[in-house]
Image: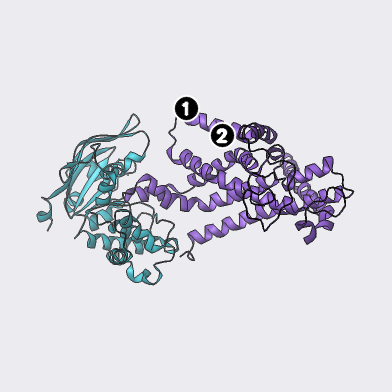
Chain colours: A cyan, B purple
Amino acid sequence: MNETILHDTIISTDDLCVYYGDKLAVKNINMEIQRNAVTAFIGPSGCGKSTFLRCINRMNDLIPGCRVTGKIEIDGLDINQKQIRMEGLRQMIGMVFQRPNPFFKSIFENIAYAPRFHGTKKKADLEVIVEQSLRKAALWDEVKDRLHESALALSGGQQQRLCIARAIAMEPSILLLDEPASALDPISTAKIEDLILELKEEYTIVIVTHNMHQAARISDETAFFLMGELIEKDITSNIFTAPGNKKTEEYISGRFG
Amino acid sequence: MKDRLATVLLTLIAVIIIAILFGLLGFILKNGAAKLNWHFLTSPPDLLNPGGGIGPQLFNSFYLLFLTMAIALPIGLGAGIYMAEYAPDNKFTQFIRLSIEVLSSLPSIVVGLFGLLVFVNLTGWGYSIIAGAFALTVFNLPLLVRITEDAIRSVPRDQKEASYALGVTKWKTITTVILPAAIPGIITGAILASGRVFGEAAALLFTAGMSSPDLVYSNFDLNSPTSPLNVFRPAESLAVHIWKVNTEGLVPDARAVADGSAAVLVIAVLIFNIGARWFGRWLYRRMTSASAS
């Protein structure tokens, strides 16, 4: 199954470097990420995996003093060009953060927010989008009777699925998940993992995770980062059974990190 | 031993502060209590005979407050948004910050004299509510800028990130995500600032003036000097009235009028303060908890 999906590149980078001030945080990354697959980034804290993830939708632009060099292409388009419209780029790439961050609004408004901004104004259309997004995020049955109540009343796991639904509502083609389950309990984590496996039918998913078992369970490919460098990237089963690099083996066998 | 001594000393200081506050409140309310009746609150002052009220002054105070906020809030809000979201971290921003601090530490009598020069004489408006409202705007603006900036900065960063990650522009993020989350803080702060405006006298002496025409409350002609809503008429506020009655009052019951006015003023300021806290908490709960719809 892996063999068939691994030859359709959607994101590719060429000597991508990220600097915070003078400090080089991510060094010369050359990577290809496959369409409609789940790619996991693993590595110890501070290894640059989240920083690299945030290059894909240019969230690093928000950090003062952060500079990105090299090339990153999505479907052949260089997204670091000046004339790239950020609204369009980020509509194509949904992102879910480590801590659930629903808006201080109702469940309905949380999901309708982005589609409304991107041009869907009719209430009936928005209602359809909200229902579809919540269904895809496996949250509809739990919240359908209280769509107009505050999203902050939901549990942490529900809030995180709401954030996934909120991202899906823009109809992106890529989903970036930055340690989406690290703040959740095991049951909520399992639900998120099931959801990721379902969503990869439609979306390209890139997930940063601290949890190696999680990477092994849900990803098709795994990339191992260390000290800002990409050590290796391969089909997940290879990484966990026969890693090509000694450092990878040491990390996944728990000798450091 | 030293530790116990410090604890006792610090507790004592706290108790003294509370005692001063309650002593003052009790004294003012006790002295003014005799005057707290409907007649006193609604009838106009009498220059010669005892029994005058503070009706126009009370109205003027609220009208001044309303006009001041109508002018100051939009400016304060805009400046606060700029300082929190747009101002780059450079010398110019530091200069703005310094200017705001200096403005907030200006004595209010100086603001009043500045108001006399600019809003009374230069504009040709004379002693008027509008001149008073502008002077109070100058006096109040630094506080409102800081309130707005603080309220916006205290909105969690992840709210902003979530909106940007959805491809939403900066301005739209500010108006649809950040401001709604900051509103409870802004409103609480604005009400507290209102208490300050309501009790201000020095900045008004030479701007809104020390007299009030006999108001005809049914007169809605904005050009008529007796219309309460005319912004170009002089308007003595309650705080100014206390000062005037105490210094140059001719009526035999001047002392009682001053005491009564002081009690009304203090009660109003208390209501603003307590109301601000209560309203802020209520608004915050409403905007964050399950009952919001």
Considering only vertical position in the picture, is B82 above or below B47? above
Image coordinates for residue A25, horizontal then vertical, percent: 31, 35
Quadrant for the N terminus of chain B, please: top right
The residue positioned 21% from the left and 49% from the top of the image is A222
Same chain, marks 2 and 1?
yes
Viewer-nearest residue: B92 or A220: B92
Question: In terms of depth relative to the viewer, which is nearer, B214 or B69?
Answer: B214
- Please give the chain letter of the residue carrying mark 2: B
Number of residues whose C-alpha sits closer than 10 Å to that of mark 1, classed few (under 14), some (14–19) or many (20 or more): few
Q: Which amino acid type is shown beneath numbered disc 2?
A: Ile
Is residue B207 toward the left or the right of residue A1 in the image?
right
Q: Residues within 10 Å of mark 2 (few under 14, many from 20)?
A: some
Q: Is residue A176 left or right of residue B27?
A: left
Circle number at residue B100? 2
The mark closer to the camera, 2 or 1, is 2
What's under tag 1, amino acid-wise?
A: Lys
Mark-to-mark CA distance, 2 and 1: 14 Å
Q: Secondary structure at mark 1?
A: helix
The chain carrying label 1 is: B
Point out the residue furthest to the top here. B91
**Image check: B264 left or right of A169?**
right
Q: Is residue A256 visible?
A: no
Can you give x and y, in whole percent of width and height, for residue A112 in the image? 34, 60
Label drawn at residue B91 = 1
Q: Is residue A45 visible?
A: yes
Q: Secondary structure at mark 2?
A: helix
Q: Could you say where residue A237 lies in the image, as x and y percent from the top left? A: 17, 53
